[in-house]
Structure formats: structure tokens, C-alpha cells
Amino acid sequence: MHKMNKICVYMCLLIQIVNGHISGHIRAHAVNNSCECGIAGNHRRIVGGSTVEPHLYPWLVSLMLGPKLHCGGAIITDLHILTAGHCITFGVHFRDLTVNVGMHDRLATSYSVLHVTNGVKHPKFTSNAVRDINDIALLTLDKKLKFTDKIRPICLPTPDMNFEHTELTVAGWGKTRQGAMTSSRFLLETKVKIVQSPTCSKSTIYKNNLVSDTMMCAYSLGKDACQGDSGGPLFGTHPKTRNKKWYQVGIVSWGIDCAMPDYPECGKPPAAIASMRIVGGRRAEPHSFPWTVAIRKNDRMHCGGALITDRHVLSAGHCFKWDNIKNLEVLIGLDNLDELTDVERRNITKVVIHEKFASSAVRDIHDIAVATLDEPVVFRPTILPICLPEPQQEFANKAGTIVGWGRVGVEKSSSKVLLKARLRILTDEDCMNSKLANHLQPMMMCAFSKGKDGCQGDSGGPLLVFEPDGKYVQAGIVSWGIGCADVRYPGVYTKVSQYIDWIHEKTADGTTCNKDE
């Protein structure tokens, strides 16, 4: 969910799509005309509050990635959901998603769960470290919806409608504040107003990334869409229908932080958000991957790693093979390399590199190592171990996440803040069909997404997969590659599931968390 910490700019393509590329996919299906669009449910919202009365906005849906809230969306026909293009990008395929329809309370069981048979992004969708352009997508459901008071489509506006001075609503189950670790249980709403482009462009970040033809800003002090609301609708009523029907004016797309004072009018995020990234990646929400550690050599970034017990770090063999461990330091609970106040520092007393480790000019084999810390750490929200996969567990075709402070390009410097990127884990067959085929071994796996990759400095860091039980497991270790983000050469990772017994043997004196807790 790459955009969950930067949402404030809303796509304004909705009028254009009626006669554009995406409308053709809508017209391919008959639309249920037995109801009116944009009619709110038969309830009133709580006065002065942010919680929505159940089913007041029956067009709202949540897009789920396993048990995890991924994005929002809106029903526009009995077969189609409108959402953001970035919700089916960065390693997430539309088939990975399920759609919760008719939902208010995420813990209830009365809503319907549907699957997605097709997902179409705008053909001109593009992305950089801060923003997405033409950030719109249409999802096709696996079966038609039956419209009721709890399930109803939103209306699309006509070209003559103007919402500049209208109070608009954004609603979703996203996180309630910047830095929150969990999403809301109940549907929440907030009211915002459109901010004119000249005002929005006062910030350098917005000035350089705002495309006024297809984007608009909306804001109210202390109110904003936040993590998990990506792809959800920005909507309001219009005098043309005597304010009785609701129209979707925009789609939650991107922004800087959540409801920060004076955004988007002034203020800057840390420069790293705009300029520092794993190739094709995004800034990770601080401490959202609390097992990730930085291994530094003489105060410079050397490798990444993952905490697997209170005293052991899993990393790559090549990170230690040719270095004196006395020159290495491990930073734990780290987000920003310039802010080390609450970071735990440890030296390394011992490193065990796999007995069959071997290296050539191109690649490393059995590229795995366990480093023992000189003193155990105490687990807390910012310092936790990663779960290990089951022996021989496979992750082909799943979405993976890499995190690290590595270089953002072949000739560029390391990042100061933790970055993440979503990749697609390839099948062994696809991996062997790449130009790396002559250098691959069964204990290796490939992962790739266009324009994204682990790069120098991310070596030894974890390749993570989010499991249906709501926990991340470490599927791989960043091992080797040719260049950075080159489509001909996917990144290569050590398959952790091939070494579970070896890892347990080397970490028997450590304490970890129960994966099933």
C-alpha cells in the first residue's frame, strides 16, 4: 500500500472517463437500471462526529489484500468498482484483492465478499516517488450486485457540474491518524473543500507534481484522507438534483502525510520522501517494519538484515564474508539515520555464514548468514522479530515487499530513511527465462516489478510477504543482481524456506515471538 501515508490530492478524471478509455469497459456490460444512483441510505449521520451511521453511503467498498485493508472504492454499476490506479500497481494484482460490499463494521459478518475478474488502469497511468498521474482504475466483479438500501451505486457527474464551493465528503476505513498502526473498525467520514490549484501549488512538492488538468486538491485543517483510504471516493451533492443525489467528484490519490497543518498550502516533508527511495520505492511509514535493521561499517551503510530473535539477525553471507565484524555495528528500531536517539546499537560477537556459501564475479550461492548481537534487545512496538516461513514454503506469484536504506540508483547515495517497494515474486520458470538463467540455483528466487528493485546497500535485507493470518514472513534475503531495476535482470533473493532447520540450529539460544499468537 505505497500511498497510504501520502493522501490529499484527488483525481478529477471522472467526467472525462464517461467518453474515455475506461467507459468502454463499463458499456460492455448491461447496467441495472432498476434503481437510482447516489441515493443515501435511510439514516442520518452522527451530529458533530466522524463515525458514519451504518450504510449511509451504500456505494462505499473496501478492497482487501488478504485480511489487510488495502484501498477504498465506489460502486458505479452492478459490476464495477471505481478506485485508484496505484491500488493495482506496485506488486498488487487485481486478482489479489477481494471486495467487501455493504460493510460498515469490519468485524461484522453481514457484508458480502466478492472477487475481482478484471482490473483496468488508465492507459496513461504513471508514477514517481511522490505522486501518481492518471491515477484511476476500474475493477470488474465476479458477479452482479443486487442493489438494496445497503448496496447502491454512486452517480458520476456531468461536464456542466461545478463542485468548487461545495462541501465534499471523503469516507473510508483508513487509519485515523498519521503513524497509526491499525485501520478503523467502523466507516469514518470527514468534510473537505476543494483548494484552488494556485494555493495548492504554493508547496514545492505540490508545485512540481500537481497536474491541474487531472488532479485537484481538497483539504480542511485537521481533516484528511489517511492510510487505507486510497482509491476511495470524494463525493458531494449538487443543486442540479436539489442536493438529493450524491456524485463522485474525485478519487483519493496522494498527498503528504495526513491532515498536517497548512498542507497543501505550505510546509515541506523531509526531502527524503521526494528524492530518496529504493529504486522505484516509497518511504516506509516509520517503524512499520520493526524487524528491519541496518548494518553499518565505519558509520556508513553496509547491509540490511532482519531481527529473528532477541539476539540474532538474518542477513546475506556476502555481507560478512570479506569484512571484520569488529568494524560493523547494528542499528535496531531505526527509521531515520539522522535520528538515532531511541535506536538500539549493538556490536556483533559472532557470524555464522552457511557452510556451502560460494561466490563468483556474478552471483553468490547459499547466500545466508546469522549474526549474533553482543547483547539481547527487549521487544517493543518499534523492535520486533520477523516470522520465518514454513520449510519449503513457496511464494511464486505473490506480492513481496523489500525494505532498506540502500542506494536509490546505481550511481546514487543511500537513503536516510527506511524505504519500501512492492515486487512480484516470479515463478522458478519465469526466473529461468530471464537473462540470469545460467547463474541461478534452486535455493534462489527472483522478484521484479517494472522500475523497482533492491539496489546496492539493501543486500541482506528482507523480502517480505504478507500472509492471510495478518503477519509478515521473510520469504527471501536480498542477495545479488545485475544493475538496478533492469527488466532483463530481476533481483535475486535467497529462499529462506530452504534453510529453516539451519536457521533454528544457529539461533537456538535466542528468544522470539510465537508466530501463532
Image (tube, helix red, strand yellow):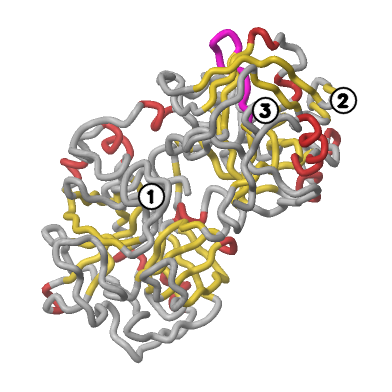
Residue drawn at x 40%, y 72% is 103
Which of 57/447 is in front?
57
Q: Disc 3 designates what residue? A: 312
Label 2 near label 3: C-beta < 8 Å? no
Residue drawn at x 81%, y 44% is 432
Q: Disc 2 designates what residue? A: 355
Q: Which mark is residue 227?
A: 1
Label 1 near label 2: C-beta < 8 Å? no
Task: Give the residues in magenta.
Answer: 297-306
Mark 1: secondary structure: loop
Of circles 3 and 2, which is in front? Answer: 3
In the image: residue 62, left or right of residue 191 = right
Residue 110 versus residue 195 in the image, above or below? below
* Mark positioned earlier in the residue sequence (3 or 1): 1
Give the residue type that dot 1 points to.
Answer: Gln
- How would you rate the neighbour count of disc 3 (Cα within 10 Å): few for under 14, some for 14-19, many for 20 or more? many
- Tell me the distance, in whole angstroms, between the alpha carbons under discs 3 and 1: 32 Å
**Residue that sits furthest to the right in the current view:** 356
On the image, the x and y values in percent for residue 454 come to: 61, 33
Q: Which mark is residue 162?
A: none
**Residue that sits furthest to the bottom in the current view:** 34
Give the residue type that dot 3 points to.
Answer: His
Residue 382 visible, this angle: yes
Residue 110 lies in the magenta-colored region: no
- How would you rate the neighbour count of disc 2 (Cα within 10 Å): few for under 14, some for 14-19, many for 20 or more? few
- How would you rate the neighbour count of disc 1 (Cα within 10 Å): few for under 14, some for 14-19, many for 20 or more? many
Residue 232 versus residue 36 in the image, above or below? above
Which of 343/89 is in front?
343
What is the count of numbered marks? 3
Give the main secondary structure, helix, strand or loop, of the magenta stretch.
strand
